[in-house]
Amino acid sequence: MTELVTGAVVDVAPPSASRAPGFPLTQGAIACAGVFTIIGVLAFSSFNLGVLLALGSFGSTAVMVFTFPEIHFAQPRSVIGGHFICTAVGLAALALLGPSWWSLATAAAVATALMMLTRTLHPPAGSNPIIVFLAAPKWSFLFFPTLAGALVMVGVAVLYHRACRRPYPSYWY
């Protein structure tokens, strides 16, 4: 279909192709309840138990794991491995190269390459080197909140999806 706009012929997509996909109300409710549950567990642990498990990138991980649990990026291997690799690379780059724009860019690029090579690609984890450079934490940050939080997130996701009778994970390894 074409349309004449100010003397030029322009292709116009049919209305259905120009809209973002919609989601059924039940799917949205299940996803929202899952995100609330996991962020609630991480936040409760961080605020009330004195165990830091919350990490900024876990918000987008939660959205991914509870809205699209079937995709590669949401599988336990990717969630745990991606967060661990990206945080480790960020910590190593900060320690070895110092806090500079090029060392942060290098950390983000190397972390992405390592996730791809290890088949643990998880886009939300790509922000972990940035978090590391902004917070300048100690190496213990790799285990609390990164590894512990990712493990808790996957554990809650498995239990939650099973309770909702949704298949998760699609694979472990």
Image: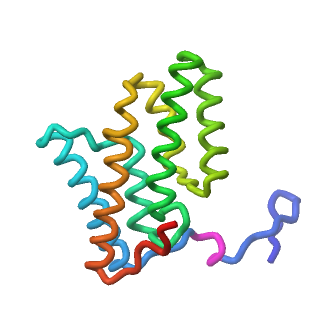
Vertical arrangement, residue 171 with respect to residue 156, above or below: below
Asked if residue 4 lies left or right of residue 173, the reply is: right
Vertical arrangement, residue 136 with respect to residue 17, above or below: above
Q: Could you tell me which residue is drawn at 43 percent across and 72 percent down?
A: 169
Identify which residue, 143 or 79, lies in the foreground.
143
Asked if residue 161 lies left or right of residue 122, the reply is: left
Asked if residue 115 lies left or right of residue 23, the reply is: right
Q: Could you tell me which residue is drawn at 32 percent across and 83 percent down?
A: 165
Identify which residue, 63 or 83, lies in the foreground.
83
Residue 50: which quarter of the image?
Answer: top left
Vertical arrangement, residue 23 with respect to residue 112, above or below: below
Asked if residue 68 lies left or right of residue 15, the reply is: left
Task: Name the outermost residue toward the bottom.
Answer: 165
Q: What is the x, y in percent for residue 82?
A: 51, 49
Residue 18 magenta: yes
Q: Main secondary structure of the magenta part?
A: helix
How many discs appear? 0
Q: What is the x, y in percent for residue 41?
A: 21, 54
Which stretch appears magenta?
A: 15-19
Q: What is the x, y in percent for residue 110?
A: 64, 37
Residue 49: which quarter of the image?
Answer: top left
Q: Could you tell me which residue is drawn at 32 percent across and 47 percent down?
A: 148
Q: What is the x, y in percent for residue 118?
A: 61, 53
Report the colour scheme: rainbow
Task: Name the outermost residue toward the left.
Answer: 48
Task: Name the outermost residue toward the front.
Answer: 173
Q: Could you tell me which residue is drawn at 46 percent across and 46 percent down?
A: 83
Residue 80 magenta: no
Q: Quadrant of the N terminus?
A: bottom right
